[in-house]
Every structure is written in C-alpha cells, then in structure tokens.
Amino acid sequence: MAWGRGGRRPRGLGEAGEAGGSKGGPHGRPVHARGGGEGVGTLGARGGPAAPDPAAPASGPGGAGRAAAKMAGGRPAAAEPTTPASRQDGGKPAASWQGGERPNPGGGRPAAPRQGGERPNPGGGRPAAPRQGGERPGAPDPAAPATDPTADSDERQLFKRNLSGNLAPEVSLLARLKTLDFMWNNLTGNIPKEIGNITTLKLILLNGNQLSGFLPDEIGNLQNLNRLQVDQNMLSGPIPKSFANLTSVKHLHMNNNSLSGQIPPELSRLPRLVHLLVDNNNLSGPLPPELAGAKALKILQVDNNNFSGSSIPPLYSNISTLFKLSLRNCSLQGAIPDLSAIPQLGYLDLSWNQLTGSIPTNKLASNITTIDLSHNMLNGTIPSNFSGLPNLQLLSVENNLLDGSVPLTIWNGVNLTGNRSLVLDFQNNSLKMFLDEINPPPNVTVLLNGNPVCKNSSGSLISDLCLPRSINQQTSKQELGTTLQCGGCPTDKTYEHNPSLPGECFCLVPLGVGLRLKSPGVTDFHPYEFAFKIDITSKLQLFQYQLYIENYIWEVGPRLNMQLKLFPSNTSLFNKSEVVRLRHVLAGWEITLLDVFGPYELLNFTLGSYESDYPDIASSGLSKVALGSILAGTIVGAIALSAVATALIMRRRHSRNNTISRRSLSRFSVKTDGMRCFAYEEMAAATNNFDLSAQVGQGGYGIVYKGILADGTIVAIKRAHEDSLQGSKEFCTEIELLSRLHHRNLVALVGYCDEENEQMLVYEFMSNGTLRDNLSAKSKRPLSFGLRLHIALGASKGILYLHTEADPPIFHRDVKATNILLDSKFVAKVADFGLSRLAPVPDVQGALPAHVSTVVKGTPGYLDPEYFLTHKLTDKSDVYSLGVVFLEMLTGMKPIEHGKNIVREVKRVYRSGNISEIIDSRMGSCPPDCFTKFLSLAMRCSMDETDARPSMSEIVRELEVILKMMPEGELIKLETPETYSGATSKSTPTSATGNFSASSQTFTSVDASSGMLSGMVTPR
C-alpha cells in the first residue's frame, strides 16, 4: 500500500488543473468519462477555449493548432480515453528497431533503425496507428512544421527559468496579457498592484517564489481571471475582500504563505469557484458559514490554520458540489456536523482538532475514500454507517474517547478486489469487546493498540491486531527496470525502451514530466494508477502506451509527487511541434483531471536529448536578449529592447555582488517584506533604549528584551551581539524558517529589524519564560505533574509539526528546556531556529535519504550521541534531545550538573530501584501509572541507539494516552483559571485535553526492588 500519511497528517503545495466532471471519479476502474471543466485556453483562444473533438482529425502544425473544437453548452468535450490497439490492428507504434544505421540522416523527421531489417513504413508520413474502434483522436502530424506557442502575444510562460529580482509595476504595460507565468523562480518583493490593470489576464501563476507583502486589492479588478496561484511564497496580511469580484475565477490557491485574518465570507459569491486552497497559513476567526452558498466548490482545503474556538458550520452539509473537505489541525471545537447530504463527498479529514460529541450516524456518500477523525475528543461508539462504503480506503478514529465494541462489519460492502485495501485505525480509544469473532480479509488492516479489548482478549490474531503500528507503511512506488533482452541503442541520444510496451525492443527518446497532485482525493494511489493513466493520456491526446509512470512518492500535504515519461509513437523521436504542444498544454493548464486526482502542478518538463533543439524552452536562465525577444511582441508602441529586458517585467538584481557593511552579510542577507520591518528607532523606543531593566534573557546570538510597541503590543526582541560570529547566518535562517512556520506550539515571529548596524528578531512575548526557568528551584511557581505533561505534549506537537508538516520538513537541532517557552496560559512553544537544518528530501527516483550529513552543532547534554560521533543528523536526533528535556521535567536536574549527565544518572538510579531519589519534589502528587509511563517514554527517547527511540508521532500519541489516564480531579476545564501552588498571580494552562493544577505536596514513591511506583508518600 502507498499511504500518503506521515505520522501526523501533513500539509499541501502548488497545483494546476481543475478536477473535472464525471461524478464520483474512477475508483480504480477503467474510465471512459468526460474530464469535465473547461480548459484554460490561453493560446489563440477565440470566443472561449475549446478541447479537441475525439472524432476530428488532427489539424494545424503537429497538432499544435488543436483539433476542431466541439462545444457543448460552452464547455469543451474532452477527448475519449484511448487504448493501444492490438497486434492484429497494427496498433503498436511503428517505431524502429535497435541497431543498424543512424536514423534518417538526410533531415526531416528521424526514424530509428531496427535490428536486421528495414525501417517500418519506409514511404514516409505517419503510419496508421489505429485504436480500438477507430482512429487516434487529435493525434499530431509528425510531418507538419513546428510552431511555437510563445510567439503568441498574450502569454508569458517563464516557468522555472531561474529568474531573480522583483516584479516591476511596468508589467501593467502588457495590456493584452492573458497568462503571467513565473512559477518556480526566485522572485522577491511585493506583487505590484498594477497587475490589477491588466484586465485581459486569465492566469496569474506566481507560485514557488519568495514573494512577500500583501495581496493587492487591485487583483479583484480582473473579471477574466480564471486561476490565481500564489502558493509557496511569503505573502502575509489578509485575503482581500475584493477577490469576491473575480466572477470568472475557478482556482484560488493561496496555501503555504503567512496570510492572516479571516477567510472573507464574500468569497461565497464567486459563482465558478472550484478549488479554495488556503492551508498552511495563519488564518483565524470563525470558518465562514457563508461558504455553504458556493455554487461550484469542489475542494475546500484549510489545514494548519488557527480557528481557535470556532466550530465547523453545519451549513457546510449544503455544499452539494463538494468532493473534498480538509480541516486538519485548525483548533476546531464542537461537534461534527452531519455531512451525509453531500452527494459526492469523497475525502473527509477533520483530524488533529478538539472536536467533541459523538460521530454522526447517517451514511456518507458512497464514493468516499478517506475518513480521518483521529486526534480529537470524540466519544460514544463507532457507528455502523461506516460499512457499505465501496471505495473506502482509510477510516481513522485513532486517539479519541470512543468506547463500546469493535465494529466487525465495516469492510462489508467495500470493494477489495485486485490491489485495493482498507485500513481501520481504532488505536488509543476505550473499545472493550468484540461482539463476534473477528476475521478481517487479508487486505484489511485493523489497528487496535491502546484499547482495553487488547487486554481482555487472547489469541494470535488478537495479539497481531494489538501491536502498535503506524499506517505509513509504504510511502512511495519505484518501478523496477524492464527485463527486455534487447540489443544496444544508438548512443548519440538518450534512447530508452518503453516499459509500457513489454516485449518490444524499440529505441525511443522520451520526455520527462514531473507532476504533483496537490490535493488528491485518495489515500492509496495504487488502485487508481490505471484510471489516472487513461485520464491524462486521453487529455494529452496520446495513446496509453506512450505514458510510463516511473515512480511516485507521497509528500507532506498529503500530496503525490510523480515522475512520468512520455514516449513518441510510430517513430523514435517527437517532432518539435509535439514537444512544444505537450509542454504548452501541461504548463498552460489546458487539461483538467478527474475530481479524485484533484488539482495538479507541473514541477518540471525535462527535454533530455531534445534540449539542444529547443534552447528557448530548456534554458535555465534568461538573457536580456531572450527576455526581450519574448516580451517585445506585446508592447503597445515601440519600446527599446533593452528597456523591455531590464525594466518591463524583471528588475534583475545581483545581490551576491552587493556589499553590506556589517559582518559579511552579503552572503546571508534576506528580505522578507511580508513580515513587519521595524526601524531601529522603534526598537529603541519599545525597550526604553535597550535598558537593562528590559532584559529578559541572553544567548549565544544576543540579548532578549521585553518591548512594548507603539500600538501596545508586548513583544520579545532578540538583538544580535556585535561580535556574534554566526549571527548573520542564524538571523537569515530564522527569518526564512519562521516566516513559513505556523503552529500553535511554535513561537510566532512578528517582524525584524535589519539596518546597517543592527539586526533584531521580534517575537510574540511569552510571559511565563522558558521551561528551564520554571523547573529551577528559584521559580516561585512550581509546575504540577499534570502541567508538565501538558507542556511536554505541546512541545512534542511543535517538533512533530517541524518533522512532518513543515514545508519543507525541518530538524530543529537545538531542542532544550531553554528553547521551550511558555505563554500566559502555560502553552508550550518551541523557539530558536538558528541552528535548524532542512530535512532530507526524496531524490528523483523517490528514495528518501535517512540522514543529513552536517557539522555537529547543538548544546552539550542534549546532543544525540550517534549524531555527535557520525555527524549524521536525523529526526531521532531531536527525539534524543526531547528525551533529555522530559528527564529534566521529571527530576528538575539540568542535563549536565556537577559533572553528572542526567541520562546516565537516571538510568543508574532506575537500575538500582531508587528512582524516588531524583524525582523533583516540587511537582506535586501524580498517579503511579502515569509517572511510570512518562519516565519510560523519556528513557526510550534518550536511548543511545537511534533505532531504539520512538518517532515523534509515537511520542505525541503516548503523551495523549498518559493525559487521558490522569484522574478527573487533576484535569480542570479549559475555561476555569486556577492558582498554582506558590504562585503570585493566576494562570490558566490550556491544552486540547485540559488544564492542570497542583493541589498537594505529597509525592509518588517507588518500590525499591523494582524501581516501579508504589503509591503516594510525602516528598523526600
């Protein structure tokens, strides 16, 4: 199984293409349905874009002119899926065999030789390649002359050209522009408001850059805009209400930024909005119930925002077009509304919230594949309505308060044929019994660990079901190489055998395509591979055998990264017009995929051996002449070529050659205009000219001050030492990371000061200081055991987010008690990312490196021994450091104190059976089982061997279980503030589980013979 889950359910990224038409999607069966939705059609569109008619012959040069359009009510009819013809039909491509002479050296379309025989169809032209039932739809003509779509004056596709600099206001001079495509470059600065003057724009594609600042209100003037993609930037501020005027827009992709404020209710007025992706921002306020009035909305993806105190509007059950609802990790409360009235709902993720009450009992739509309700506070029983859902792949209710019996009929009615499978995750609830003998089918996985039923039942099958397991057992697919026994191919080009043509020794030169499904509606892609192949080849006007899915890997999101190869048919090489056509269709969003695959984005279009023939497509950079030649055709009037190249679109900058006076900052300087940029005078005023009385801390980077901004906001200001040797690098690292990280257990960056002789970071102020301060014997406010658990869980969730949901994932590398801060309600937040490193990412084959090799950095006492010895940094390095923090919380000791190491001391005392010797006497009473489990977890985290340590997802899961074991008297309601023993003021610690207070000064003792807890006694 290829499960798109990595511990805690992750986040999303860039995309393209609206999920289209046929209701319910393919669900693993061959699809012969319309793709639905209209193409973008930025090239030469007249009276609206049109898709090719399957019955029409190819027209125009190489098919680039498109087949004759057949319009049906203003919407295009997508091409019918094709299948390779049989041998009897001559349906295999008439490509040439290996060996022999060079193909067609005289010019024209080359034809590769075959072994010991003449070239097929030597008469020239294109051999007939019939499909079942007729001619291939809209196939390109190999003999036709090449045309370049970029010659048209209404689009600028500068996708992935390694461009840097700012978008200039002069872009508005491109008055006829329809497509503005700067995806996957290195653009910085703001989006100019003048873009709102280009009323012809249909596509704004700016995702994958470093743009900052606010989204301009003026974009709302673009009545023809179909798609706005600004995801994966550093944009901040609110979503403009003026976007409600984009009456033609279908796709609003604003995810993975730093947007704040509410989702404008006015967006519900958009009549054609299909995809609203705003996940991984800092949005707040209630979810707007008005979105229930959206007439065409199919995907609402809002994960990883903070709608604290908000509930899911019951009116969302009225969004009749909705296919995917993803509200993961949004601090939502209240009950789950009844969503059974949504007829096409295929994917539901409400995990990692604070939802309460019982699960609705009405049955969801029959085409649903994924139901994730894990990590909430749901109670009651697991309803029977989850059975009889034929396409279900995952049902997760892990980590709730569900009780009753284990349901044994859920897999009844589920289609489990072929490579289909089902995972039922019931772990860490209160399920007590089986009503009947359990015997799941071989391709059904049932997970029961952490339920009383595991203690009450016996047998090998029960034992297997009760093992602690994670469901991300396989995250990728790597195709094996073909085993064809063929001779060698010519070496002048990158010839390959097409694995989709088993047994055929054709030497073909493929194109490489990287696609990412940004919001797929499945959890396991294996059963949908064939349907995907049919869907995309039919819309690309290719035979199925021309597409080979080389590999795919699930990424944080969850999203699916795919590497494809497109092979020519009937010849060894694509002609130029076909190369240009395929790139243009994919990069211009002229196709839409089925709902179940969701929106896609083009990551790369690899030419390989074709690169020398198409330098304008292949170039990784863009010279002034090239840029000018692309842009000059759209200028009204005569504008000098050099002016176009240097000012019209790109104001190039060469920051590497700039000099900055302070500490070689030219190597590390970074601008993040999306955050508040403070002047030095503002910082001085906020801290009373950096008075000693304002100092609240000090570290290797600099001094931390408490400051009050002009608007009254209390902040923490970290001011760099003048002699901080690594300060500049840490400064840039922290800004870049924190501007993209948004989680309630990470310290939020408010802004920065970057002047010639000063660098400061401005954070939210954490009024209760560091965890280390609160564990100190000098603290007047001792932390109870329950509160320490609450803090441990919060810090663990923050680190889990860094490992599994940050984009890209991050290893903190300096987890310690002084880097865990506590707000006014004792909510733990992880801080200080100056030493952080990006986690390894999959290579082109989908293989994920196990570690990052790096110079050892960190704090003595917290350093992972294996990292220290091998220089190999892994996620388990943070786990070790966190384990040391846990031991600090249990003992009050420092990591290294009086020459003693805390890990060795705890292990020594534990083996001796005198654990009471080192229990912190200030933390109050605690249940023996809870203490034992927390101590065991801390010791496993701090094991010397990397593989012996638990993962962060396992740590979070175990801490949640321990909190659930706490007596009700130790858990108080979130709304009720309590005074801590010895406190001088009231504080209200909050968590998803509850608040804690210390009410006793008795402590847990230990059985000296076993080292285990035996009861409550007075402190040592």
Image (spheres, grey):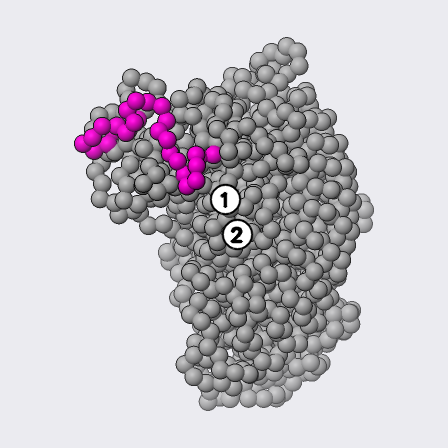
Which of the pair 402/117 is nearer the observer?
117
Q: Is mark 2 on a helix, strand or loop?
A: loop
Q: Which residue is drawn at 48% across and 27% down?
A: 58
Q: Is mark 1 on a helix, strand or loop?
A: helix
Q: Do the residues labelled 2 and 1 touch (CB within 8 Å)?
A: yes
Q: Which amino acid does label 2 sit on?
A: Pro
Is 127 contained in the magenta span?
Answer: yes
Q: Does residue 948 sit above or below 877 in this rendering?
A: below
Depicted 738 relative to depicted 397: above or below = above
| Residue 1015 higher or lower than 336, as above or below | below
**Camera-nearest residue between 271 and 961:** 271
Q: In percent of the image, x 74 and y 37: which residue is there?
A: 247
The reply to whether residue 235 is visible in this rendering is no
Instruction: Out of 780 and 951, give the one closest to the viewer.
Output: 951
The image shows residue 584 at horizontal and vertical percentages of 51, 30
Picture disc at residue 535:
1
Query: Residue 975: percent from the left, percent from the top?
Result: 77, 69
Q: Magenta residues? A: 111-137
